[in-house]
Amino acid sequence: MRPASECDKQRGSVGNVMKAGLRRYKEMINEGGLNTDQKVIAIQKEVEEATALELPMLQKNLVFLSTYCYRVGTLIARWERYWV
């Protein structure tokens, strides 16, 4: 089982970020001109860039989730007041 294919199966923001990090890690394994610290920094930068690309989609979904939770919370509070 390949980790990149598992990221593709997930088809979401976390999978996309992980796949970018794995891709850069694979590139850094074959890179001979950099020391370990430089390789780690390159991988971290790739993960940060991928996260920055995925963040707007996550924020867009948070608006829906917060609205939903607010409405359900109000509904439960009203239900509790009448039935308890």
Image (cartoon, rainbow, N blue to C red):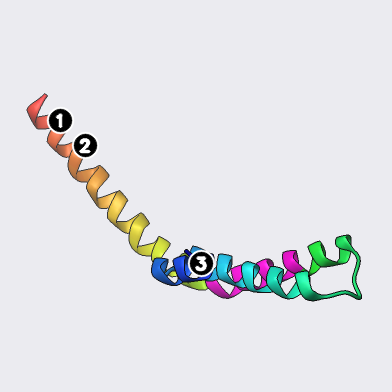
Q: Amino acid at mark 1?
A: Arg
Q: Residue furthest top?
A: 84
- Where is the C terminus found, in terms of image quarters? top left
Label 1 – label 3 distance at C-alpha:
53 Å
* Left or right of residue 12: residue 24: right
Q: Which residue is mark 1?
A: 81
Q: Amino acid at mark 3?
A: Arg
Quick check: is 13 in the magenta stretch? no
Residue visible at 35% across and 58% down? 65
Image coords of residue 14 (percent x, y): 50, 63
Residue visible at 51% across and 72% down? 56
The reply to whether discs 1 and 3 touch (Cβ–Cβ < 8 Å) is no
Q: Residue furthest front?
A: 1
Residue visible at 87% across and 66% down? 38
Precedes in sequence: disc 2 or disc 3: 3
* Left or right of residue 83: residue 44: right
Image coords of residue 53 (percent x, y): 58, 75
Q: Which residue is mark 2?
A: 77
The reply to whether discs 2 and 1 touch (Cβ–Cβ < 8 Å) is yes
Q: Residues within 10 Å of mark 2 (few under 14, many from 20)?
A: few
Instruction: Give above or below for 37 relative to 4.
Output: above
Image coords of residue 69 (percent x, y): 30, 50
Query: Residue 47 is drawn in which quadrant?
Result: bottom right
The magenta segment is: 43-55
Residue visible at 53% across and 71% down? 54
Q: Nearer the viewer, residue 69 or 7?
A: 7
Q: Which residue is mark 3?
A: 2
Q: Residues within 10 Å of mark 3 (few under 14, many from 20)?
A: few
